[in-house]
Image (spheres, rainbow, N blue to C red):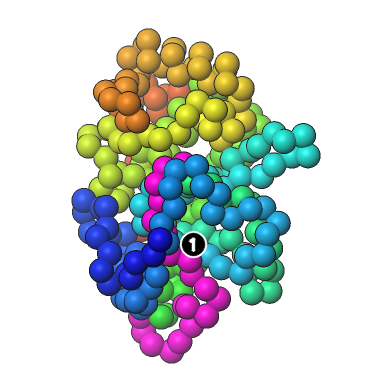
C-alpha cells in the first residue's frame, strides 16, 4: 500500500524530526510504503540499493546465524533513517522486519542529489543520522560484551525512551512498546528466561510498569539510569542530533 508524502499525516505530536521535514521538503511527492506487523521488508543478502526513512512504527534490523539464531542489530523508531544497501554495494547486510505496523519512505540512490539548497541540507541531515546510528550501535556492542542482563535491558529501555521523547512520542516516561520478550532477547543477546526474570525484577522493584498492553512506563528513571550506568542528559547529547 502506498500514499504520497504531501498528503501524509505524521504521528509526531511535536514538529516532525528535522530529517523528515528536510526530506519531504526536498521530495514532496515521495511514495510512502505501508507494512503490517510481522512483515519482512527486506531479507539479508537480497538486492538492495536504497536507504529507508521511517515515519511510523518500530522496525528491527537483524542478522541470522547458520543455526537460525537471530541477533537484532538495531531497532528503528519513527523519524529514524537507515542504510540498507547502496548503488555500489547493492546487497542488504541485514533483514528488516516490522515489529508493529510501519510507514516508511524508500530513499533511492539519486533522491538526495541536486544543487538546490534543500538537497544540500538533506545530505547533511542524512550524514548526521549515520553518525547517530553508529553511536548507538557502539554503545550496544559495548554492553553486549561487558554488561549484566539488568544493565543491558535498562540501557535498551532508556535508549528507546530518549529517542521517542525527542520526537514527542512519550507521555511523561510512558510510551508504546511493541517488542515481545523474545525480541528484547534478540536485541540484548539474552535468552527469554533471562529477559523474563529481569523484566519481572524491574517491575517488582517499581522501576518499570505496564499501564496497558503494548505500553511501558519507566516509573523510576533515576534507578534505571543507575542500573544502565548512564547520565541521562549526557546520553541525550550523545545519541540525538543537536
Q: Nearer the viewer, residue 88 or 148?
A: 88
Task: Decide: is 63 above or below 158.
Answer: below
Q: Residue furthest bottom?
A: 115
Image-based side of 136 in relation to 34, left or right: right
Quadrant holding the C terminus = bottom left
Figure quadrant of the N terminus = bottom left
Q: Is residue 64 magenta?
A: no
Residue in view at x 72 percent, y 36 percent: 68
Q: Quadrant of residue 48?
A: bottom right
- Using a 10 Å C-alpha cutoff, classify the residue at mark 1 as few (fewer than 14 neighbours), some (14 to 19) or many (20 or more): some
Does 108 appear in magenta?
yes
Q: Nearer the viewer, residue 136 or 108?
A: 108
Locate residue 72, reporting x and y percent.
59, 40
Q: Is residue 140 visible?
A: yes
Q: Position of residue 29 (x, y in %)?
A: 34, 76
Q: Name, please, the residue furthest toward the front.
A: 1
Secondary structure of the residue carrying numbered label 1: strand
On screen, residue 38 versus residue 100, left or right, reads right
Q: Overall secondary structure of the magenta stretch?
A: loop
112 to 135, vertically: above or below: below
Q: As rendered, which of 4 and 124 lies closer to the eye?
A: 4
Residue 37's place in the image compared with 1, above or below, is above
Numbered range of the magenta stretch? 99-118
Res. 237 in view:
no
Q: Residue at x 44, y 72 (%)?
A: 124
Residue at the disc numbered 1: 52
**Left or right position of 95 against 6:** right
- Name the residue rendered at 35%, 30% in the picture: 214
Q: Is residue 189 above or below residue 129?
A: above
Percent position (x, y) of residue 42?
59, 55
Q: Choose top left, top right, bottom left or bottom right for residue 67.
A: top right
Give how far across and how far down residue 18 sits, in percent: 32, 64
Amino acid at each position: 500500500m502506498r500514499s504520497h508524502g504531501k498528503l501524509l499525516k505524521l504521528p509526531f505530536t511535536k514538529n516532525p524530526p528535522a530529517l523528515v521535514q528536510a526530506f519531504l521538503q526536498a521530495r514532496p511527492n515521495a511514495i510512502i510504503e505501508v507494512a503490517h506487523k510481522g512483515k519482512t521488508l527486506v531479507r539479508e543478502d537480497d538486492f538492495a540499493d536504497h536507504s529507508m526513512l521511517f515515519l511510523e512504527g518500530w522496525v528491527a534490523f537483524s542478522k541470522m546465524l547458520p543455526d537460525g539464531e537471530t541477533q537484532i542489530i538495531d531497532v528503528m523508531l519513527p523519524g529514524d533513517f537507515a542504510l540498507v544497501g547502496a548503488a555500489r554495494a547493492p546487497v542488504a547486510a541485514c533483514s528488516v522486519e516490522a515489529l508493529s505496523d510501519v510507514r516508511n519512505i524508500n530513499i533511492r540512490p539519486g533522491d538526495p542529489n541536486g544543487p538546490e539548497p534543500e538537497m544540500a541540507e538533506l545530505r547533511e541531515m542524512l550524514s548526521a543520522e549515520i553518525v547517530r546510528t553508529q553511536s548507538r550501535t557502539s554503545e550496544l556492542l559495548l554492553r553486549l560484551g561487558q554488561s549484566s542482563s539488568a544493565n543491558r535491558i535498562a540501557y535498551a529501555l532508556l535508549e528507546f525512551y530518549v529517542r521517542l521523547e525527542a520526537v514527542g512520542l512519550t507521555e511523561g516516561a510512558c510510551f508504546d512498546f511493541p517488542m515481545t520478550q523474545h525480541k528484547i532477547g534478540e536485541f540484548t543477546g539474552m535468552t527469554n528466561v533471562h529477559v523474563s526474570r529481569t523484566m519481572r525484577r524491574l517491575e517488582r522493584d517499581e522501576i518499570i510498569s505496564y499501564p496497558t498492553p503494548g505500553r511501558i512506563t519507566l516509573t523510576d528513571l533515576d534507578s534505571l539510569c543507575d542500573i544502565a550506568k548512564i547520565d541521562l542528559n549526557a546520553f541525550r547529547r550523545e545519541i540525538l542530533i543537536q
